[in-house]
Image (cartoon, grey):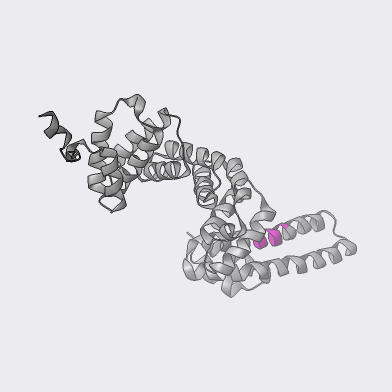
């Protein structure tokens, strides 16, 4: 029997003794993610947790995410973090999961960790951070993030519109002036940018008019009258600059919202016919 045993062929390893981790990785490489997930489950259930690496949990979590099992992916990512393992892919995926779940606080935490600790795909991550900071009214942080974004990303219309809204809320008029014109180059019928410019020139003209009329009424001299005429010319120029913006807005939404601007502008021009036309829209 000893002789027979010594002459026997190489030992054949039964299929069920092959590492489930090996099967999982092979299945994932072949695109069979469902089998990979099941094999990872078996691997984790059979191994002492102290012998499982954070990298293994991270790899398995990515596969679970690919199968659409976000809950399992998060569970395994939590184990990954417990093992003090972190990667750019891991936090990028976590941010995507929390965004799909509309869990903005956890998404923000994942993005902030990513932005602080990793350098790849930062534009994508910072763009989303920029959006979230605006959404939750952390405008100062949004502007800090804006400075980290490259010029191509900043020049995207969606980011420009958000940047405009932030600066409008912060009353940064000079920034809004310049950004609104860039927006209108890309999106000529953008209502917010049209309103900004229309109202800017309207109030510049109206404030000039009211200010100088008050000065003249308090001091009706020939000198003050000449100053009044000069200033009224400047106010008229401002009103004329405002008109094209309001005309575009009127085409988009004719009615009461913009009628008062037109009525007052044409009143300053002395055009009673148009004043009466626009007043009909005022309730």
Residue 1 shown in magenta: no
Front in this rendered view, residue 191 or 282: 191
- Determine the residue positioned at 62% across, 64% down: 181
Residue 55 percent across, percent down from the top left? 40, 37
In the image as oriented, which residue stretches furthest toward the left? Answer: 1
| 86 in relation to 255, above or below | above
| 251 in relation to 211, above or below | below
Front in this rendered view, residue 252 or 3: 3
- Determine the residue positioned at 47% across, 36% down: 109
User: Which contiguous range is marked in magenta?
Assistant: 198-207
Please indicate whether residue 138 sits to the left or right of residue 15 in the image. Answer: right
Residue 148 is at least partly visible in this image: yes
Please indicate whether residue 149 sits to the left or right of residue 56 in the image. Answer: right
- Determine the residue positioned at 12% across, 34% down: 4
Q: Hey, which quadrant is residue 44 in on the image?
A: top left
Residue 61 percent across, percent down from the top left? 34, 40
Residue 204 shown in magenta: yes
Residue 67 is at least partly visible in this image: no
Residue 105 percent across, percent down from the top left? 44, 36
| 51 in relation to 88, above or below | above
Total residue callouts: 0
| 69 in relation to 196, above or below | above
Please indicate whether residue 51 sits to the left or right of residue 220 in the image. Answer: left
Residue 157 percent across, percent down from the top left? 53, 61
In the image as oriented, which residue stretches furthest toward the front? Answer: 3
* Image quadrant where one finds the N terminus: top left
Q: Hey, which quadrant is residue 233 in on the image?
A: bottom right
Q: Hey, which quadrant is residue 104 in on the image?
A: top left
Q: Main secondary structure of the magenta part?
A: helix
Please indicate whether residue 178 sits to the left or right of residue 283 in the image. Answer: right
Front in this rendered view, residue 90 or 250: 90
- Determine the residue positioned at 41% across, 28% down: 82
């Amino acid at each position: 029997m000893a002789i027979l045993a010594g002459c026997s062929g190489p030992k054949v390893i039964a299929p069920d003794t092959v590492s489930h981790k090996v099967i999982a990785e092979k299945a994932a490489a072949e695109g069979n993610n469902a089998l990979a997930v099941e094999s990872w489950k078996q691997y984790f259930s059979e191994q002492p947790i102290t012998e499982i690496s954070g990298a293994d949990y991270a790899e398995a979590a990515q596969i679970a995410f690919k199968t659409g099992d976000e809950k399992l992916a998060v569970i395994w990512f939590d184990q990954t973090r417990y093992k003090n393992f972190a990667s750019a892919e891991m936090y990028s995926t976590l941010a995507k999961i929390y965004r799909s779940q509309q869990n903005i606080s956890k998404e923000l935490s994942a993005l902030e960790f990513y932005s602080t600790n990793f350098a790849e795909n930062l534009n994508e991550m910072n763009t989303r951070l920029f959006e979230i900071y605006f959404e939750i009214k952390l405008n100062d942080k949004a502007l800090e993030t804006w400075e980290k974004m490259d010029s191509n990303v900043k020049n995207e219309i969606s980011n420009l519109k958000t940047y405009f809204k932030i600066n409008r809320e912060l009353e940064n008029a000079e920034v809004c002036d310049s950004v609104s014109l860039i927006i209108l180059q890309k999106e000529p019928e953008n209502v917010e940018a049209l309103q900004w410019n229309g109202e800017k020139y309207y109030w510049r003209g109206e404030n000039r008019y009211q200010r100088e009329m008050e000065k003249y009424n308090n001091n009706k001299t020939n000198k003050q009258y000449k100053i009044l005429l000069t200033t009224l010319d400047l106010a008229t120029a401002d009103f004329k600059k405002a008109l094209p913006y309001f005309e575009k807005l009127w085409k988009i939404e004719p009615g009461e919202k913009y009628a008062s601007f037109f009525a007052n502008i044409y009143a300053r021009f002395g055009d009673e016919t148009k004043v009466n036309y626009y007043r009909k829209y005022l309730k």
